[in-house]
Image (cartoon, rainbow, N blue to C red):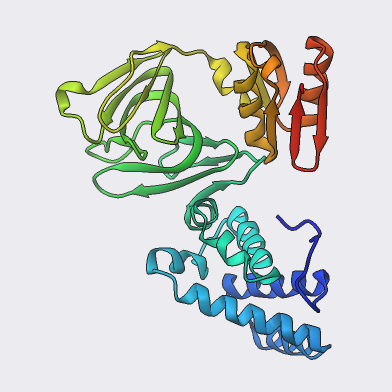
Amino acid sequence: MTEPLAAAGPGIEPRILQEAAQWLAQMQEAPLNPAEQQRLAQWRGQSAQHQRAWSRAERLLARVQGLPPDIAKPTLGRPGDAPGRRRVLHGIATALLLAPAGWLLWRSQPWRDWLAADHVALTGEQHDAALEDGSQISLNTDTALDVRFDARQRLLRLRRGEVYIRTAPDSASPARPFLVQTAQGRLLALGTRFSVRQFDGATLLAVYEGAVQIRPDDADTARHLTLQAGQQARFTRDGIDPPAAATEDAAAWRQGLLVADDMPLPQWADELARYSGKTIHVGAAQRALRISGSFPVHDLPRALRMLADTHRVTVRIEGQTVWIGA
């Protein structure tokens, strides 16, 4: 999120824009004390470029303050912001300071989810946390999750991505249900370990221990379904697919691995692309290939070399694009 910038807009050095973004992010964490305000004033007075960079930062701040409250409030810094959100804030500030086109980036869904959520794993990251009831969560790459515990329920809201959950018994009396809300429905955990992945238009639930009930938002109670350990199912707002077998291999990302068992090459490519942010194209002649083995999710060049050595396919990397085959 904070790597060197390739372009800085007319007349402002990338280094100065980076520094302006750092000041802006710091201001959203907490009000500047007098000494910090003095250092900021000195920084602004160093050159005309510094002054222009800060004018752009002030315009950015005015834009953020004009956002709807549900977006603007978390953006402007709430107590206890996680390090992941601070990195996101700095990244957004940097992108927006680069040029007006950066505003389009801010308006995209991933940025809003990442900044507003309680727990975040950026692209290529994983994040583990313990919840107040003792439950454990692990977030996979590009994931944003909210936690809403109250007197009636323990609720997680999966905004995007994938989460692995190990529930703990509730110490409250009466015990509160443990629920996970996705865009398609609600899950009721019954003392369990399970994973939930949000796709476009569908949710995938895999249960590894205990049981989890699926409650699609637009289906009546007669169509609810409880999955037992070793089962997985995909569901939409109005229905649930037939259950299939689930294995712990699907959660091997927690150990930094993608475990493939006769996986179609296009699916293999899509899975690895989640961790790098790169686009992977598979040639028509290679799409029928089936892939098996364990591949590192955080070392795309190595995974591609393993693929090329095993299946004798050509691999070409051009910037943010990977070509497999023709």
Residue 308, position as x, y percentages in the image: 81, 17
Closer to the camera in the image, 35 or 160: 160
- Above or below, 25 relative to 176: below
Closer to the camera in the image, 228 or 44: 44
Left or right: 326 in relation to 145? right
**In the picture, which quadrant includes the C terminus?**
top right
Number of disc labels? 0
**In the picture, which quadrant includes the N terminus?**
bottom right
- Above or below, 275 relative to 235: below
Residue 183, position as x, y percentages in the image: 36, 40
- Above or below, 308 relative to 271: above
Left or right: 21 in relation to 245? right
| Residue ID at (62%, 62%) | 92
- Above or below, 32 relative to 131: below
Residue 292, position as x, y percentages in the image: 67, 10
| Residue ID at (53%, 52%) | 114
Residue 149, position as x, y percentages in the image: 34, 48
| Residue ID at (53%, 50%) | 110
Closer to the camera in the image, 226 or 137: 226
Location of residue 214 by image quarter: top left
| Residue ID at (58%, 75%) | 60
Closer to the camera in the image, 151 or 23: 23
